[in-house]
Amino acid sequence: MDKLQNIRGIAFDLDGTLVDSAPGLAAAVDMALYALELPVAGEERVITWIGNGADVLMERALAWAREERATLRKTMGKPPVDEDIPAEEQVRILRKLFDRYYGEVAEEGTFLFPHVADTLGALHASGLSLGLVTNKPTPFVAPLLKSLDIAKYFSVIIGGDDVHNKKPHPEPLLLVASRLGHDAGTDAFCRRFA
């Protein structure tokens, strides 16, 4: 218990810890896939791809969609059609589409988990410095936190584009501790383990 009394700051993960963002992420992934005339994946499948940032999410979505389309075309006796455009180029295009669509659906497709606002308010009122560390693309983070009415609790926000190495690499956690003005040894990090 003595160690907990020495904690001066807490950094939180966003997706899956404070919010359920799966509906919005899945909708944006499916809209991007559909725009490229690829099979849509659905929320249940997209959930399994979330957690390592938007670029990795796009790589996983594209790999699945290309395989799905190849299987479908094979059953119809047709050759694959994806070899003419390199996967890297398709991922880049898919990411641009995802960003556009996610900007449209992020707020209505993201929900606070129960008691999050009250917990953040109590921690903030107790004098703890609160930070947020997420792999979510940085341009989406502040508007989303504002729409959920929790931006006011965080003195430091680190988005996925603010660091070279995304979580689980320690770089974003060390950065948030530094910006909170603390030694990483006096901070705690809260995230989901699933």
Image (cartoon, rainbow, N blue to C red):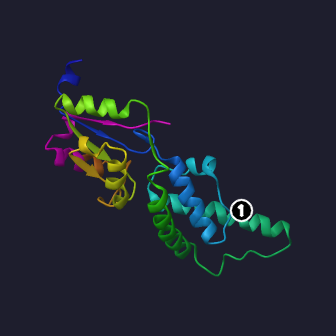
Q: Position of residue 40 (x, y in %)?
A: 65, 60
Compared to residue 186, the image places residue 177 above or below, namely: below
Q: Is residue 74 left or right of residue 48?
A: right
Compared to residue 187, the image places residue 91 above or below, namely: below
Q: Position of residue 63 (x, y in %)?
A: 61, 63
Q: Residue furthest left?
A: 181
Residue 7, located in which quarter of the rendered image?
top left
What residue sits 63% from the left and 67% below the top? Answer: 34
Q: Position of residue 35 (x, y in %)?
A: 60, 70
Q: Position of residue 12 (x, y in %)?
A: 32, 40
Q: Is residue 192 magenta?
A: yes
Within 10 angstroms of label 1, few (less than 14), some, or many (20 or more) residues? some
- Please name the residue that numbered disc 1 is placed on: 68
Q: Secondary structure at mark 1?
A: helix
What residue sits 43% from the left and 41% below the top? Answer: 19
Quadrant that contains the N terminus: top left
What residue sits 25% from the left and 28% below the top? Answer: 122
Q: Which residues are magenta?
A: 175-194
Amino acid marked by disc 1? Glu
Q: Is residue 189 magenta?
A: yes
Q: Is residue 52 left or right of residue 42?
A: left
Q: Nearer the viewer, residue 16 or 78?
A: 16
What residue sits 62% from the left and 46% below the top? Answer: 44
Q: How many marks?
A: 1
Q: Nearer the viewer, residue 164 or 132?
A: 132
Residue 123, located in which quarter of the rendered image?
top left
Residue 183, located in which quarter of the rendered image?
top left
